[in-house]
Amino acid sequence: MDQHDFEDPIKPFPAERPHIVELTRLWQGNRKLVIAKSRQMIVTWWACMIALWCVLVRPGQFIVLQSKREEDAIGNETSGNGLLGRCKFIFNHIPGRQWLVPKVEMLSNQLIVPAMNSTLFAIPQGGQIIRTNTVSGIISDEAAFQDEFSDAYTASLPCLRGGGWMVAISTPHPGFFHALYEDRLSEFIG
């Protein structure tokens, strides 16, 4: 969804952009990605695409979509806003999807793929929901602005050790996310 194009706002995803190709390659080979970004790089759209892809083609996935506020994580599927809203928007605009992909159930805070026993779940910041579930993957958007991102990261460690993955995305801002991005976590530990 291109909010700046009044004539043709719905576009195919530009998967051929060099940074998107590289991010996809990095995601395929790493359990943890920490991505500093700026606006209009479509990194959050990319992350939503990989989360949606996982629940559509991999069985037994429970993927958490996390933002500072639950409302930001849920978003709006009509405008492609928020993490889950973007996932739903993408799903609704897959060409020929009725022939290609399984049916989904769309709840206010979830996208469920019954045929794959997989779910996307939109949650607010913090580690409690991550800690109390066995998650396959985590997308954390604007992580540098989540006051409880360090708790979410700590809660994600069993997921990462168990074969799951985490993608933390944010525009730069000093704090835990920035230290994680620069591999300086020792500054936050005792």
Image (tube, grey):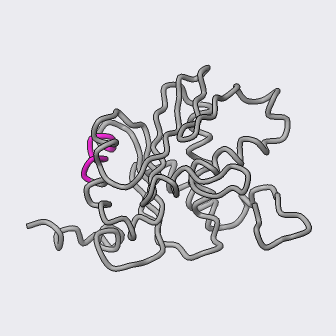
What residue is drawn where x is 63% and y is 34%? 106
Give whichever of 186, 151 is nearer the camera. Answer: 151
Extreme-right residue of the structure: 7
Extreme-top residue of the structure: 115
In the figure, 115 relative to 160: above or below? above
Q: Is residue 46 left or right of residue 142?
A: right
* Residue 18 in which image quadrant: bottom right
| Stretch in magenta | 154-160
Q: Is residue 55 left or right of residue 60?
A: right
Q: Is residue 173 left or right of residue 27?
A: left
What residue is drawn where x is 27% and y is 60%? 150
What residue is drawn where x is 55% and y is 49%? 74
Q: Is residue 99 left or right of residue 44?
A: right
In the figure, 25 relative to 137: above or below? below
Q: Quadrant of the N terminus?
A: bottom right
| Number of marks in picture | 0
Give the overall secondary structure of the magenta segment. helix
Magenta highlight on residue 94 = no
Q: Percent x, y for residue 134?
A: 34, 33
Q: Percent x, y for residue 86?
A: 65, 52
What residue is drawn where x is 37% and y is 65%? 146
Give whichever of 96, 16 is nearer the camera. Answer: 96
Q: Percent x, y for residue 105?
A: 64, 29
Q: Percent x, y for residue 137?
A: 44, 43
Q: Quadrant of the C terminus?
A: bottom left
* Residue 13 in which image quadrant: bottom right
